[in-house]
Amino acid sequence: QMLSLRADLIPQEYCDEFAKLQDSVKPFPFAQVKNILESEYKKPLKDVFKEFEEKPLASASVGQVHKARLKSGEFVAVKIQRPDIKRIFEADIDLLKYIAEEAEKYLPQLKPFKPKKIVEEFEKYTEKELDYLAEAKNIEIFYEKYKYSPKIKIPKVYSEYTTHKIIVMEFIDGRKISEIDSLTKEEKKKITLVVYKSFIEQIFDMHIFHADPHPGNIFLMKNGKIAFLDFGIVG
């Protein structure tokens, strides 16, 4: 995800390929989605949602998002954690620890970058990312801050439908900011300034900031507002 934004470091065709990791990872089947939802809610899917789209809107490394409609009529985005993701992450982190250790041992020029420390940091924020209740709390902090903002939109969380493996939030109708080539240079500049000023505000005023701001997590809405999504990682 990070490298997909760095055409200054790697060729553009590599960036385009890595960009698929933002929200186009191979989705897991709807049968598994249904199982997870019903086991978390302890009731059939039709008792919770009026409508539920089987095809995901987006699918990333930790979870995937489906559009649904609550019994009360509101359209929502339902984010479901990938089955077995905790075990996969633990295996990946073990591999990274091994590689970091070997790198420090045999490549002394890497030692100043502290590869082992980097892996430990990654492990820490990944553990938090796997708890959707923690993410829901993060969203609520940002929602409270920006609910009256004329420029920024944060989705509202439906906490009564949210668990460690599921987040249900307000559906955001918009496009990824990487998909808005039709905009003029002026319009793009305006959007960039809104995002930039918001990050300054998050860091210096709120003291908590969105730490995963790739294009899959920043949307331009039809009303011109900028929506921030996915608060699994905050700084």
Image (cartoon, rainbow, N blue to C red):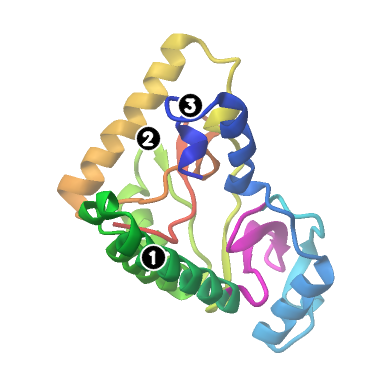
Nearest to N terminus: mark 3 or mark 1: 3
Which residue does the image show at 25% across and 47% down from the upper left? 202
Classed neighbour count for the residue bearing mark 3: other residues with Cα under 10 Å, few (<14), some (14–19), many (≥20) = few
Residue 122 vs residue 54: left or right? left
Nearest to N terminus: mark 2 or mark 1: 1
Three-letter code, disc 1: Glu
Q: Is residue 63 magenta?
A: yes
Instruction: Find numbered disc 1 in the image and state the secondary structure of the residue it sits on.
Output: helix
Rounded to the nearest angstrom, the CA distance separating label 3 from label 1 is 29 Å
Q: Would you name the residue on which mark 2 appears?
A: 150
Rounded to the nearest angstrom, the CA distance separating label 3 from label 2 is 33 Å
Residue 151 vs residue 196: left or right? right
The image quarter in which residue 2 lies: top left
Q: Would you name the residue on which mark 3 appears?
A: 7
Classed neighbour count for the residue bearing mark 1: other residues with Cα under 10 Å, few (<14), some (14–19), many (≥20) = few
Q: Would you name the residue on which mark 1 appears?
A: 102
The image quarter in which residue 98 lies: bottom left
Three-letter code, disc 2: Pro
Instruction: Find numbered disc 3 in the image and state the secondary structure of the residue it sits on.
Output: loop
Rounded to the nearest angstrom, the CA distance separating label 2 from label 1 is 51 Å
Three-letter code, disc 3: Ala
Q: Which residues are magenta?
A: 59-85
Q: Quadrant of the C terminus?
A: bottom left
Which residue does the image show at 49% across and 54% down from the upper left? 230
